[in-house]
Amino acid sequence: MTTVTLDVVPAFEVSQWVYDDLPRAAVNDHLEEIFASAYSVSLFTDWRRPGFHQVWLKRRDGRDLAAPPARWLGATLADGPRHPIAGMPVENCTEQLGAPGPWHARLPHFRMEFTPSSGKELQSEYLLPREHAVEALAAIDSIRDRVGPLVQVSEIRTVARDDLWLSPCYRRDTVGIHFTWVPDTTAVMRVLGRVEEQLAPFEPRPHWGKLFTLDPAALANQYERYGDFAALMGRYDPTGKFRNDLLDTWFPTGR
């Protein structure tokens, strides 16, 4: 890579609001409305009960100035700051309750100077076509007796499509199902196999930098430009000087 072109926008402010206890039925019936309700929307659940214990709405000031209603799709506007993980200090989170601030101090969930999330965790995330969101959530919910005991929190978000060959969002509008697990690698790796079985009908693409157990051949089938990327690696690094264990596992043909 020799040059980079940046596509930038003017700096802007964001106000952040949180709702408590969004019913599962509201997501099933109003998915598009929910994710179109703000500049950035995140749903949080621990899979121990139906529904979502928090919804985080990040709104661009100047576009969404109206104060949010006290009740929305069965959820209740939070009466104070929240942390996505029960029992964690709310001071770690970026400012809520509608206080406007610069985009870089609101779009992250956690303040830069504090430990994000719980700090002691494992993570995985599966990204799949947005139109399968409701079915995929139901599939995970059906094994919540296995998932719930190991999850600290799970975030559901949407991501726009892009044209990057190995992006999990390559040419499809995406829903991401993220898991923040307890730091027990053995137990988590066992349950990941079950999660992947449940999501298999929806063509999930795992986050490259987080835990997953998909077979390399199955993973290759999720990326239509996989072969092109492997050929590119072979062309520019024929001796494998820049390869590592991760590339040897997931791109054995790129030699």
Image: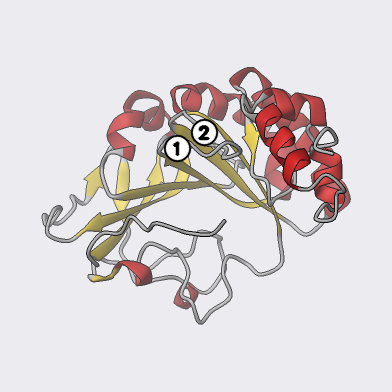
In the image, is residue 233 above or below residue 203? Answer: below
Q: Which residue is mark 2?
A: 170
Which residue is depicted at the point 34% across and 50% down?
40
The quarter of the rendered structure image containing the N terminus is bottom right
Relative to 18, 12 lies left or right: left
Quadrant for the C terminus in the image: top right
Q: Amino acid at mark 1?
A: Asp
Within 10 Å of disc 2 (Cα), the crowding (few <14, some 14-19, many 20+) is some
Would residue 168 appear left or right of 93 to someone viewing this image?
A: right
Q: Position of residue 130 (x, y in %)?
A: 45, 28
The residue furthest bottom is 113
User: Which residue is painted at 73% across and 33% down in the image?
Assistant: 231
Q: Which mark is residue 27?
A: none
SS at mark 2 in the image: loop
The answer to whether marks 2 and 1 mark residues whose Cβ atoms lie closer than 8 Å is: yes
- What residue is rendered at 85% in x and 49% in y? 240
Instruction: Farthest residue to the top: give it.
Output: 201
Question: For the point 77% across and 30% down, which residue is it?
Answer: 194
At label 2, the amino acid type is Tyr
Element assignment for label 1: loop
Seen from the viewer's position, the closer of residues 246 and 179 is 246
Q: Position of residue 128 (x, y in %)?
A: 55, 30
Tell me which numbered mark, 2 or 1, is placed earlier along the sequence. 1
Position of residue 242 measured from the top left corner of the image (x, y, whole percent): 80, 55
Q: In this view of the protein, which residue sits in the foreground, 241 or 54?
A: 241
Mark 2 vs mark 1, CA separation in Å: 5 Å
Q: Position of residue 2 (x, y in %)?
A: 53, 59
Q: What residue does disc 1 label?
A: 162
